[in-house]
Amino acid sequence: MQKILKTKAVACFLIITIALIIIEVGSFSFFYIKYGKSIPKEEIHKTLLPSNETIQTAEVEDPPPTLMKDHVLHPYLGYVRNYKKSQHIFDEKVVKIPVNPHGFFGISPLEKKNKDEIHIALMGGSVATQLFLYSKDQLIKKLKESAFFKNKKLKIISMALGGMKQPQQLLALNLFLTLGGKFDIVINLDGFNEIALPYLENIPVNVYPFYPRFWHFYAAKAIDTDVAGMIGKGVLIKEEREYWRKVFSWGSLKHSSFFLTVWYALNKQKQNEFTKIHNQIRESLKLRLKSPQQTGPEYTFDSPDSLFKDSADVWKNSSLQMSKISKSNDIKYFHFLQPNQYLKNSKVFTEEEKKTALAGESQPFAKAVRKGYPFLMEAGQSLKNSGIQFEDLTALFKKETQTIYKDFCCHYNQYGNDLLATKIANVISNHNFNEN
């Protein structure tokens, strides 16, 4: 009897093993037939990591529901981060640096300044924010290599926010100087948001291009039930995706071709569902009757080029005003135009970058960079000719053979942020701080 049971157990084991082998081998064939390529295990593994928990859409950043959850309305700056939140997620990571009561990462813009300190205000959008979060120590280190900064205590004060665009930086500088902020140096790192967001986000929903991003959301007195329902569905999709990510990343499942194939299909489905909901929200908002509180003044333009030209002019005029305000407060002002991958001949791309950094090639923000950045570069040269400390960094990565860009929008990896910090520090260090 025991012999029979043992034989049956062995037979069952062999049948299960053979079935699993067939399933694993069959997964390779199924994946190739379904998607026309071999199972990209490394690529799929990345989607199972916690740092990739945000579903990507064809957006520059997370769509309005997430931004509204993380931000609060601000009477002068449009919006700031909600400092009372217990956890802050930025760039798909939990940020350890706290948010101060004024809604920015790090120490307050009104931090008391001691005589032996140099306060450096860093302004701009998400690129400037990431420079602060990931490479502020590199910036300080490189600045202190120069004789002028060597024995001084440097404090970097972030007044940058994801999505911020001029004239928000100008208004922030005015606001915190008015409230008593003390700064010795202002670094303004921007350009992408100013040229891309009016074209990508404001104009399609008939909002004045120089209002803050998603202003129609923030300024709405009430949100209609249809849109609220769509937002709820979007949040539910993200939660479902996160639940299954945890399941498929458990133990040896992430090494199984079968389970990776199932996850790949499920993740793709959730991304498509989320993008569909996101587009429905946009279309619904386009059809809504908006008040002047949401839309601002009417704006007309003849062609995308005229919009890009106007956007570059607002960017230039804002920088001019920031320079004048800085000079009148004995502050040294430095303006930097950030690099972007969609500017032609600005970098030799690695194989990894070709798959990730250029994935948005067909998106509106890529067109905005290709068409609009030349207007920024021309305006920047005008700033420089006016005596402003302006530096065009669009060619910063031109000779870099390593991977720099980490997403299909505009952001850099740690190596790229450190290179950016080093370049900014070198430009500032070469300035004669004894001149008027």
Image (cartoon, rainbow, N blue to C red):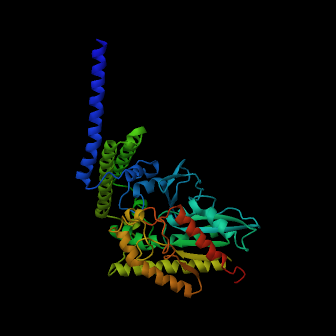
Is 415 left, or right, of 121 in this rendering? left
Q: Nearer the viewer, residue 276 or 262?
A: 262
Q: Name the spot of residue 156 as percent of width and height, x first.
A: 64, 64
On the image, which quarter does residue 139 sit in? bottom right
Q: Residue at x 54, y 63 (%)?
A: 415
Number of numbered discs: 0
Q: Residue at x 46, y 48 (%)?
A: 50
Q: Is residue 95 visible?
A: yes
Looking at the rendering, in which quadrant would you find the C terminus?
bottom right
Q: Nearer the viewer, residue 90 or 172?
A: 90
Q: Residue at x 67, y 61 (%)?
A: 111
- Of all residues, the one furthest to the top in this rendering is 1
Is 301 left, or right, of 311 in this rendering? left
Q: Name the spot of residue 198 as percent of width and height, x first.
A: 40, 71
Is 84 left, or right, of 343 in this rendering? right
Q: Is residue 328 above or below residue 282?
A: below
Q: Name the spot of residue 316 as percent of width and height, x first.
A: 50, 80
- Of all residues, the one furthest to the left in this rendering is 33
Q: Is residue 360 above or below residue 52?
A: below
Looking at the rendering, in which quadrant would you find the N terminus?
top left
- Of all residues, the one furthest to the bottom in this rendering is 385
Q: Is residue 180 visible?
A: no
Q: Is residue 228 above or below residue 333?
A: above
Q: Name the spot of residue 432 as percent of width and height, x first.
A: 69, 81
On the image, which quarter does residue 410 sit in? bottom left
